[in-house]
Image (tube, grey):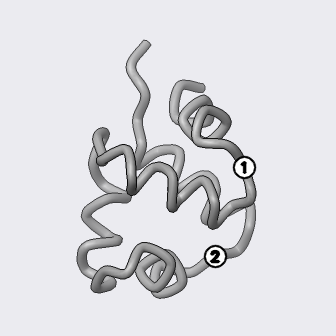
Amino acid sequence: MPTDVGKALRICRTKHLVSNAQVAEALGVAPQQASRIANTQHASTRTVEKLAALFDMKPSEFLAIGEE
């Protein structure tokens, strides 16, 4: 099953009570771009690494959430 980065991001944001603005700040992007990432299945390796770090997990752990 392919990994859904957006799904992983939405689940982690809800679980950790992280706002879209906080995600945008961690990624160094505008809030609109963070919203686009939350609604897509793919992201760059660097973006996945930054998202995983935001939620204090390894990239592989973060991506596994999108496979559930």
Q: Judge left or right: residue 16 versus residue 50.
A: right
Q: Secondary structure at mark 1?
A: loop
2 above or below 29? above
Measured from the top left, where is residue 10 in percent x and y?
52, 56
Tag shown at residue 48: none
Q: Please tell me how crowded label 2 is: few (under 14), some (14-19), or many (20+) other residues with Cα within 10 Å.
A: some
Measured from the top left, where is residue 64 in percent x and y?
60, 29
Tag shown at residue 18: 2
The reply to whether the C-beta atoms of the residues labelled 1 and 2 are less than 8 Å apart is: no
Residue that carries the numbered disc 1 in the rendered image: 57
62 above or below 67? below
Q: Please tell me how crowded label 1 is: few (under 14), some (14-19), or many (20+) other residues with Cα within 10 Å.
A: some
Measured from the top left, where is residue 27 in percent x and y?
42, 73
The amino acid type found where label 1 is placed reads: Met
The amino acid type found where label 2 is placed reads: Val
Q: Earlier in the sequence, mark 1 or mark 2?
A: 2
Q: Residue at x 69, y 61 (%)?
A: 55
2 above or below 14? above
Q: Secondary structure at mark 2?
A: loop
Q: Residue at x 74, y 58 (%)?
A: 56
Q: Judge left or right: residue 5 versus residue 65.
A: left
Q: Residue at x 54, y 35 (%)?
A: 63
28 above or below 63? below
> In the picture, which quadrant includes the N terminus?
top left
